Amino acid sequence: MEIIRDASELRGAILQRRLAGDSVGFVPTMGFLHGGQLSLVERAKDENGCVVVSSFVNPNEFSMLDEATRTPRNTEHDLALLEQATTDIAFLPEVATVFPPDDRTRVTVEGLTRQLEGASRPGHLDGLTTVMLKLINLVGPARLYLGQKHAQQVVLLRRLLRDLFLNVELVVCPTVRANDGLALSSANAQLSIEERHAATCLYTALTTAKQAYERGERSAEVLRARMTDAIEAEPMARLDYLSVADAHTLAELQRVTGPALALVAVWIGRTRLTDNMPLAWDVA
């Protein structure tokens, strides 16, 4: 596995792989890797001759509420996991590599970066889209791999790729969960044993909404009420937001008549957790 920190070196290494006939799969991460992210690497290995995994957190662009900004870094552990997963290139740029001192350009996806996560963490999603466009331009992948765990990011990046005519296939992989339903996340490492148990209320809320939908409930207001009840039943949980939204636009729904998402963000102690579940469709 090549470990690269320089942008020009990255481009040179990827060019060599392309000349050898390899397609490039790209898995962007913010480090502190877990099984969910490694499942993306595995999928990318199955579908490409070369897999690039980035690890980058820009403290100037990501809100301090973001789970990754408070999670301790463990680069050696991450690299060992990537080596075991037979990753071809690990890209670990410094902030100045991605955002030079004279950088002035930011990317906004109108109508999608101000709601849900954008409302709770102003500026976070603009930072995300900007970073992702920069990384995509540096890597030049044939395929970009994201987890359904970050549903709003998936919607944003699908729109970004389409609107800017980027010739990149977006591959969305199902959320990887623990046995109790909690979505794997770097934030989970911050939870105490008691908090970890309380955090399952997110999965309970989402499955309650999905089961109600499958039994024929189509009122988004009723589905949101069922989710609210499940969260409020957990004393340690503090609700940030919940939503039943159109799966393509993230517009809040009155009735579920097509592909939709149930989404929730909850504080458990000092840790903020997010999760979602598709309604009326399945993630491949």
Image: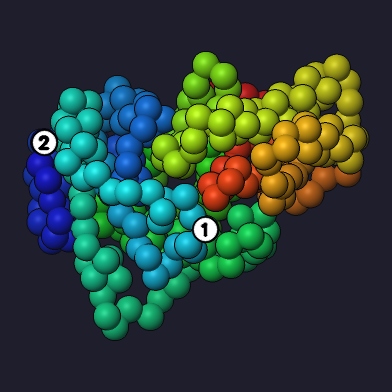
Q: Judge from the rendering whether residue 75 lies leftward or rightward of residue 164; answer left or right.
A: left
Residue at the location (28% across, 48% down)? 73
Callout 2 amino acid: Met
**Quarter of the rendering containing residue 1:** top left
Towards the viewer: 234 or 273:
234
Tell me if I can see residue 101 in this picture: yes
Pointer 1 and pointer 2: residues touching (CB < 8 Å)?
A: no
> Quick one: 123 or 142, which is closer to the camera?
123
Q: Give the residue at x 21% y 37%.
A: 77
**Total numbered circles:** 2
Q: Residue at x 30, y 54 (%)?
A: 56
Would residue 278 be visible to someone looking at this image? no
Q: Give the labeled residue for mark 2.
A: 1
Q: Nearer the viewer, mark 1 or mark 2?
A: 1
Determine whether 212 is above or below 145 in the image. above
Q: Nearer the viewer, residue 234 or 207?
A: 234
Report how far apart the C-alphas of labels 1 and 2 lie in the structure: 33 Å
Which numbered tag is attached to residue 65?
1
Question: Given the image, on which type of amino acid does mark 1 rest?
Answer: Leu
Q: List x then y, in percent, for residue 242.
A: 73, 45
- x, y percentage for residue 124? 51, 63
Q: Which comes sooner in the sequence, label 1 or label 2?
A: 2
- Label 2 sits on a secondary structure element that is loop
SS under mark 1: loop
Image height of 75 relative to 234, above or below: below
